[in-house]
Amino acid sequence: MIFIATHLPNFIAICGLPPSVGAEAIALIGICNAVGTLVAGYLCQRWGNRNVLALIYLLRTASVAIFFALPVSVETTLVFAAAMGFLWLSVVPPVSGLINGLFGPANFGALFGVMFMSHQVGAFLGAWLGGLSYQWSGSYSIGWVSLIVVGVLAAMLQLTAADDRARALRQQ
């Protein structure tokens, strides 16, 4: 996700769009974050954390793949930014629920902190490797394809993980 925040403005500038579109895209990502998080929390209560998290990963991946496949325009960029914003922080409710469901509330703060720290390492790698791949190849294609591959893997891993509701029932 930080690959997008870091490199989307430059990517769309390379595609010939004005810098204002990059600024509008980043702003739209921020605006849509709150709505996506609220909707994800609501869906987690109905469908379970594992299913919602897998769905978020699949929708992120589909959004990236569609944006990468379509011609870059103001419209496609802003729709993509809205989708990414909606899906950006929407992982917090299901991840929080999974941590709490798997390990209980006693160590939630420490475990959530470890998870958050690992995401910061991933964010650093996303920004740095995106820039490095652009520097080496002169294109962001490697970065976009990498996002798609990682998204598919994340969704598959989440779908094959044990359900937190099933585990809670076994422990009763």
Image: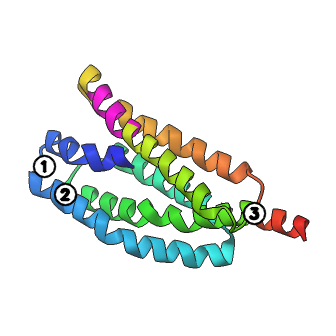
Mark 2, secondary structure of its residue: helix
Q: Residue at x 37, y 68 (%)?
A: 33
Q: Position of residue 54 (x, y in %)?
A: 61, 57
Mark nearest the camera among 3 and 1 is 3
Mark 1, secondary structure of its residue: loop
Q: Main secondary structure of the magenta part?
A: helix
Q: Position of residue 32 (x, y in %)?
A: 34, 70
Residue that badge 1 annotates: 17
Residue 52 found in image quarter: bottom right
Residue 55 makes an appearance in the image = yes
Q: Taking 148 as reference, is 94 above or below it?
A: below
Q: Which segment is the magenta one?
A: 125-134
Q: Is residue 19 left or right of residue 41?
A: left
What crowding class fits label 2: few (fewer than 14 Cα within 10 Å), some (14-19), or many (20 or more)? some
Residue 26 versus residue 149: which sits nearer the camera? 26
The reply to whether dot 1 and dot 2 touch (C-beta < 8 Å) is: yes
Tell me which label, 1 or 2, sits earlier in the chain: 1
Q: Position of residue 57 (x, y in %)?
A: 54, 54
Q: Quadrant of the C terminus?
A: bottom right
* Alpha carbon separation for disc pair 2 and 3: 41 Å
Q: Is residue 93 left or right of residue 69?
A: right
Q: Taking 25 as reference, is 169 above or below it?
A: below
Q: Residue at x 76, y 60 (%)?
A: 163
Residue that badge 3 annotates: 164
The amino acid beneath tag 1 is: Leu
Tell me which label, 2 or 3, sits earlier in the chain: 2
* Alpha carbon separation for disc pair 3 and 1: 45 Å
Check if residue 40 falls in the magenta segment: no
